[in-house]
Image (cartoon, rainbow, N blue to C red):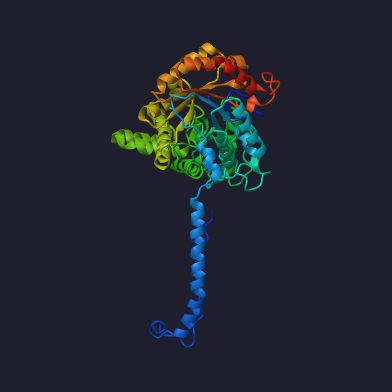
Amino acid sequence: MSLEEDKPVEGRPEAGQEESLHPAQSAPVDPPTPVFAAFTTPPRQPVKRILFFIVPFLLVSLSALFVARQRAAVPNPKAARAKAAVPPLTPQSEVRAIWIVRYTMTSPEAIRDAVKRAKLAGITDLVVQVRGRGDAFYNSLWEPRAEELAKQPKDFDPLTLMCEEAHAEGIRVHTWLNAYVITLFDKLPKLPEHQVYTHPEWLMVPKQLAASLYNVEPRSPQYLARLRAHVTANRNVIEGLFASPAHPEVKDHLLKVYMDVVGKYDIDGIHFDYIRYPNTSFDFSRATLDRFREELEPTLDLPSRARLAQLAKRNPLVYANTFANRYQDFLRNQISETEAAIYQAVKARKPHLPVSAAVYSVPEEAKAWRLQDWQSWTERGTLDIVCPMVYTPDTALYCKQLTAAMRGASGKMLWGGIGSWRQPVPETLDKIKVTRELGAQGFILFSYDSAVQFSTLNPQKDYLERLREGLAIYSR
């Protein structure tokens, strides 16, 4: 499951135009001056006068630039002290983490309150959602500012404030970005610059619509309307519209988005979610089908190639259907390639920064049902921390699934993902005890938002406070 699954769908606390520059046309001088004349006989007095004005200006400009650079080179003392108070992440220290859904990132007051309550609860790591549905809860170079921030001033940067406040309390901040899901299941974004409108050709297509949409122009209203209708009709199993991992432009875009955050913010980790397919009925978009055909054809003999090419004129799915297992491997590889590319870029920029991912707990099931081969990521060394989403209230099943996840983690750090929103505090504490007994490096709760909101399990909205009291009893 992804972080936002298994919750009531409605109201859940989730989960340029180039300017042409034309040089001005000068009016011809009458009579024209020979080109070299200006350089061979320069009048001295005008030059001295010009220098008289230019030299002081240049000196002042250079001085200002020097001072600006010096100031930029000096870190903010408050931020530096706060960062110094943050302990390093080590396998020897238990991690007590919590996912914070983006709706808490919509005001300074909510952010400060979240940090305060996390500190009181003994939380060591905050995994904060800054990309929910192809939007940004931070100052992004590549994606539109989230609609939920419309009432806030433009200079409000939720991620900067979260880092400052958390670091001042000695708490680490990991930025959580949903990779492929880019819309809600029940409504489309209002922002005209959102990628669902600017790049509808990036969207995944279900197998049921593949043949009928193959020759439809993605920018036609029909294309998006039919995809949306399919998602709405299958809202219990599909969270929204997804971007296609096989589209080269999607790969490039995601790399830019993740590295924008890594490069600009003083974060303590980067976190993947929705780095998967909705299910095995996706993706059969034209871009993905065509890429698979291009990759497959050179491996076929000439008669097979000719036969399939003829069949494909009537059925664009013929290659995917004929080589179904290879097609699924191809789909898995698209995600794995992007995950590896982002990981390597992160390490090249900030070698110390840990990369984590929320994954389906049983690696074989994740690979088969969501085409998410996360075990291969740990085996090849492109994932530092595994966060299996073991949201079941059943403690015995939690133990079984977490054991499977630890096997797939290949020795990497693992934080047991506990669905605290769906169980009372004593049962959450039982899961924490199991997590410790199995030797995991920590736990992560989903979610902060449910822990501070009213529910039948949390009528006093004091889940974190009661959890803190229980942890004191369960402490090692």
Q: Quadrant of residue 145?
A: top right
Left or right: 310 with respect to 5? left
Q: How many marks?
A: 0
Q: Quadrant of residue 247?
A: top left
Residue visible at 51% across and 31% down in the picture: 273
Figure check: 40 above or below 94:
below
Nearer to me, 297 or 117: 117
- Residue 366, given in percent of the width and then of the height, sits at 46, 23
Nearer to me, 55 or 362: 55
Nearer to me, 343 or 321: 343
Figure check: 70 above or below 445:
below
Figure check: 228 above or below 194:
above
- Residue 13, given in percent of the width and then of the height, sits at 63, 29
- View extreme (top): residue: 396
On the question of residue 382 being in view, the answer is: yes
Left or right: 440 with respect to 454? left
Residue visible at 47% across and 88% down in the picture: 31
Left or right: 454 with respect to 436? right
Residue visible at 51% across and 52% down in the picture: 72
- Residue 70, given in percent of the width and then of the height, sits at 49, 55
Q: Quadrant of residue 325?
A: top left
Residue visible at 41% across and 19% down in the picture: 407
Nearer to me, 75 or 347: 75
- Residue 9, given in percent of the width and then of the height, sits at 63, 27
On the question of residue 131 being in view, the answer is: no
